[in-house]
Image: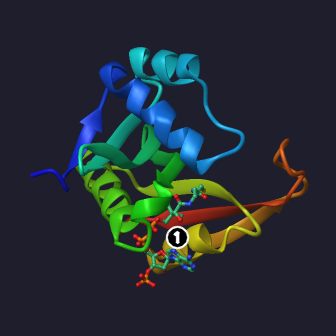
Amino acid sequence: MESEVTPLGAEHVRDLMALEGKCFAYHWTQEQFLLGLERSAFQVLGIYRKGILAGYIAFSIIEDEMEILNLAVHPDFRRQGLGEKLLKESFRVCNENNVRKSFLDVKVSNEPALGLYRKFGYKKIGVRKKYYPDTREDALLFRYDFT
Ligand SMILES: CC(C)(COP(=O)(O)OP(=O)(O)OC[C@H]1O[C@@H](n2cnc3c(N)ncnc32)[C@H](O)[C@@H]1OP(=O)(O)O)[C@@H](O)C(=O)NCCC(=O)NCCS
Protein backbone atom coordinates (compact mmCIF):
# COMPACT_ATOMS: atom_id res chain seq x y z
CA MET A 1 0.00 0.00 0.00
CA GLU A 2 1.27 3.43 -0.97
CA SER A 3 0.87 5.06 2.42
CA GLU A 4 3.05 2.51 4.21
CA VAL A 5 6.39 3.45 5.69
CA THR A 6 9.26 1.87 3.78
CA PRO A 7 13.07 1.78 4.15
CA LEU A 8 14.84 4.05 1.63
CA GLY A 9 18.24 3.48 0.00
CA ALA A 10 20.61 5.04 -2.51
CA GLU A 11 18.03 4.53 -5.28
CA HIS A 12 15.70 6.96 -3.48
CA VAL A 13 18.20 9.82 -3.10
CA ARG A 14 16.75 11.75 -6.03
CA ASP A 15 13.32 11.72 -4.30
CA LEU A 16 14.93 12.67 -0.99
CA MET A 17 16.66 15.67 -2.57
CA ALA A 18 13.38 16.87 -4.09
CA LEU A 19 11.67 16.62 -0.70
CA GLU A 20 14.54 18.35 1.11
CA GLY A 21 14.32 21.22 -1.37
CA LYS A 22 10.63 21.67 -0.45
CA CYS A 23 11.20 21.52 3.30
CA PHE A 24 14.51 23.19 4.20
CA ALA A 25 16.45 26.20 2.96
CA TYR A 26 19.64 24.65 4.33
CA HIS A 27 19.55 20.97 3.62
CA TRP A 28 21.56 17.80 3.21
CA THR A 29 23.39 17.26 -0.07
CA GLN A 30 23.12 14.22 -2.32
CA GLU A 31 26.65 13.22 -1.24
CA GLN A 32 25.72 13.34 2.46
CA PHE A 33 22.74 11.05 1.82
CA LEU A 34 24.72 8.64 -0.36
CA LEU A 35 27.73 8.42 1.96
CA GLY A 36 25.57 7.95 5.04
CA LEU A 37 23.45 5.26 3.40
CA GLU A 38 26.42 3.42 1.85
CA ARG A 39 28.29 3.34 5.16
CA SER A 40 25.12 2.58 7.14
CA ALA A 41 25.84 5.64 9.28
CA PHE A 42 22.09 6.16 9.42
CA GLN A 43 18.89 4.62 8.17
CA VAL A 44 16.11 6.35 6.31
CA LEU A 45 12.41 5.51 6.27
CA GLY A 46 10.02 7.14 3.85
CA ILE A 47 6.38 7.33 2.94
CA TYR A 48 5.04 7.80 -0.59
CA ARG A 49 1.74 9.46 -1.47
CA LYS A 50 0.38 9.95 -4.99
CA GLY A 51 3.66 8.66 -6.41
CA ILE A 52 5.88 11.20 -4.67
CA LEU A 53 7.97 10.98 -1.55
CA ALA A 54 5.76 12.73 1.01
CA GLY A 55 7.92 12.33 4.12
CA TYR A 56 11.07 10.81 5.55
CA ILE A 57 12.92 10.27 8.78
CA ALA A 58 16.69 9.73 9.07
CA PHE A 59 18.10 8.32 12.28
CA SER A 60 21.20 6.60 13.60
CA ILE A 61 21.43 3.81 16.13
CA ILE A 62 24.66 3.36 18.08
CA GLU A 63 24.50 0.65 20.71
CA ASP A 64 21.43 1.48 22.79
CA GLU A 65 21.04 5.08 21.60
CA MET A 66 19.03 6.40 18.72
CA GLU A 67 19.43 9.92 17.34
CA ILE A 68 16.92 11.54 15.03
CA LEU A 69 18.96 13.35 12.38
CA ASN A 70 16.14 14.67 10.26
CA LEU A 71 12.42 14.41 9.79
CA ALA A 72 10.41 16.16 7.10
CA VAL A 73 6.97 15.99 5.54
CA HIS A 74 6.15 17.63 2.19
CA PRO A 75 4.14 20.85 2.75
CA ASP A 76 1.19 19.46 0.75
CA PHE A 77 0.89 16.46 3.10
CA ARG A 78 1.35 18.02 6.53
CA ARG A 79 -1.14 17.61 9.40
CA GLN A 80 -2.24 14.25 8.04
CA GLY A 81 -0.39 12.14 10.56
CA LEU A 82 2.61 11.27 8.34
CA GLY A 83 5.21 12.70 10.73
CA GLU A 84 3.66 10.61 13.46
CA LYS A 85 3.68 7.47 11.28
CA LEU A 86 7.37 7.93 10.47
CA LEU A 87 8.33 8.50 14.09
CA LYS A 88 6.27 5.49 15.20
CA GLU A 89 8.00 3.23 12.68
CA SER A 90 11.44 4.46 13.80
CA PHE A 91 10.41 3.56 17.38
CA ARG A 92 9.46 0.08 16.17
CA VAL A 93 12.97 -0.32 14.69
CA CYS A 94 14.40 0.92 18.01
CA ASN A 95 12.43 -1.67 19.95
CA GLU A 96 13.69 -4.41 17.63
CA ASN A 97 17.26 -3.27 18.29
CA ASN A 98 17.01 -2.94 22.07
CA VAL A 99 17.45 0.82 21.97
CA ARG A 100 16.94 2.40 25.40
CA LYS A 101 17.02 6.14 24.69
CA SER A 102 16.56 8.62 21.89
CA PHE A 103 17.96 12.13 21.40
CA LEU A 104 17.36 14.97 18.97
CA ASP A 105 17.83 18.68 18.59
CA VAL A 106 15.28 21.11 17.25
CA LYS A 107 15.11 24.84 16.57
CA VAL A 108 13.48 26.73 19.40
CA SER A 109 10.97 28.31 16.96
CA ASN A 110 9.92 25.04 15.30
CA GLU A 111 6.45 24.68 16.83
CA PRO A 112 5.24 21.80 14.60
CA ALA A 113 8.29 19.66 15.40
CA LEU A 114 8.18 20.58 19.09
CA GLY A 115 4.50 19.59 19.18
CA LEU A 116 5.22 16.25 17.52
CA TYR A 117 8.15 15.33 19.78
CA ARG A 118 6.29 16.36 22.94
CA LYS A 119 3.30 14.29 21.84
CA PHE A 120 5.61 11.26 21.72
CA GLY A 121 6.91 11.94 25.23
CA TYR A 122 10.27 13.56 24.48
CA LYS A 123 11.51 15.78 27.33
CA LYS A 124 13.70 18.84 27.02
CA ILE A 125 17.13 18.25 28.57
CA GLY A 126 19.13 21.27 27.47
CA VAL A 127 19.80 24.18 25.16
CA ARG A 128 22.66 24.80 22.73
CA LYS A 129 23.00 28.51 22.21
CA LYS A 130 23.07 29.78 18.61
CA TYR A 131 23.58 26.23 17.40
CA TYR A 132 22.25 26.44 13.84
CA PRO A 133 24.57 28.00 11.25
CA ASP A 134 21.70 29.20 9.01
CA THR A 135 19.66 31.24 11.52
CA ARG A 136 21.95 31.28 14.61
CA GLU A 137 18.93 30.05 16.55
CA ASP A 138 19.20 28.09 19.79
CA ALA A 139 18.78 24.32 19.66
CA LEU A 140 16.63 22.57 22.22
CA LEU A 141 17.88 19.11 23.13
CA PHE A 142 15.27 16.45 23.72
CA ARG A 143 15.44 12.95 25.15
CA TYR A 144 13.07 10.01 25.21
CA ASP A 145 13.54 6.91 27.35
CA PHE A 146 12.15 3.62 26.06
CA THR A 147 10.75 1.56 28.88
C1 LIG B 1 7.46 18.66 11.87
C2 LIG B 1 6.76 17.93 10.73
C3 LIG B 1 7.65 16.76 10.28
C4 LIG B 1 5.41 17.37 11.24
O1 LIG B 1 4.86 16.52 10.23
P1 LIG B 1 3.29 16.29 10.04
O2 LIG B 1 3.12 15.11 9.16
O3 LIG B 1 2.64 17.55 9.59
O4 LIG B 1 2.83 15.97 11.53
P2 LIG B 1 1.56 15.10 11.98
O5 LIG B 1 0.40 15.39 11.08
O6 LIG B 1 1.98 13.67 12.11
O7 LIG B 1 1.26 15.72 13.41
C5 LIG B 1 1.57 15.03 14.60
C6 LIG B 1 1.62 15.99 15.76
O8 LIG B 1 2.65 16.96 15.58
C7 LIG B 1 2.23 18.24 16.10
N1 LIG B 1 2.12 19.22 15.03
C8 LIG B 1 2.20 18.97 13.68
N2 LIG B 1 2.09 20.13 13.00
C9 LIG B 1 1.91 21.11 13.92
C10 LIG B 1 1.74 22.52 13.82
N3 LIG B 1 1.70 23.15 12.62
N4 LIG B 1 1.63 23.23 14.98
C11 LIG B 1 1.68 22.62 16.18
N5 LIG B 1 1.82 21.27 16.34
C12 LIG B 1 1.94 20.54 15.20
C13 LIG B 1 0.90 17.99 16.75
O9 LIG B 1 1.15 17.59 18.09
C14 LIG B 1 0.36 16.81 15.95
O10 LIG B 1 -0.57 16.05 16.65
P3 LIG B 1 -2.16 16.44 16.51
O11 LIG B 1 -2.46 16.36 15.05
O12 LIG B 1 -2.83 15.38 17.34
O13 LIG B 1 -2.29 17.83 17.04
C15 LIG B 1 6.46 18.88 9.53
O14 LIG B 1 5.80 20.03 10.01
C16 LIG B 1 7.70 19.31 8.73
O15 LIG B 1 8.17 18.62 7.84
N6 LIG B 1 8.25 20.52 9.05
C17 LIG B 1 9.41 21.06 8.29
C18 LIG B 1 10.65 20.26 8.53
C19 LIG B 1 11.05 20.25 9.99
O16 LIG B 1 11.04 21.27 10.65
N7 LIG B 1 11.42 19.06 10.49
C20 LIG B 1 11.80 18.86 11.87
C21 LIG B 1 13.26 18.95 12.04
S1 LIG B 1 13.68 18.70 13.76
Side (left or right) of 5 relative to 134: left
Crowd band around label 1 with a 10 angstrom C-alpha radius: few (<14), some (14–19), many (20+): many
Residue 142 vs residue 80, the one in the foreground: 80
Q: Which residue is mark 1?
A: 117
Q: Is residue 58 above or below residue 92?
A: above
Q: Is mark 1 within 8 Å of ligand 1?
A: yes
Q: Where, by quadrant of the figure, is residue 118 drawn?
A: bottom right
Residue 136: percent from left, percent from top: 90, 51
Side (left or right) of 43 relative to 25: left
Residue drawn 50% across the image and 60% down it? 75
Give the residue type at disc 1: Tyr
Q: Secondary structure at mark 1?
A: helix
Residue 79: percent from left, percent from top: 42, 74
Residue drawn 50% across the image and 24% down it? 33
Farthest residue, direction left? 1
Residue 40: percent from left, percent from top: 40, 22
Residue 36: percent from left, percent from top: 49, 22
Side (left or right) of 134 relative to 71: right
Q: Is residue 123 above or below residue 93?
A: below
Residue drawn 58% across the image and 39% down it? 21
Please tell me how many numbered marks the rendered image carries: 1
Q: Is residue 89 above or below residue 32?
A: below
Q: Where, by quadrant of the figure, is residue 64 drawn?
A: top left
**Colour treatment of the image:** rainbow
Residue drawn 48% across the image and 42% down it? 19
Side (left or right) of 51 relative to 20: left
* Quadrant (top left, top right, bottom left, bottom right) of the C terminus: bottom left
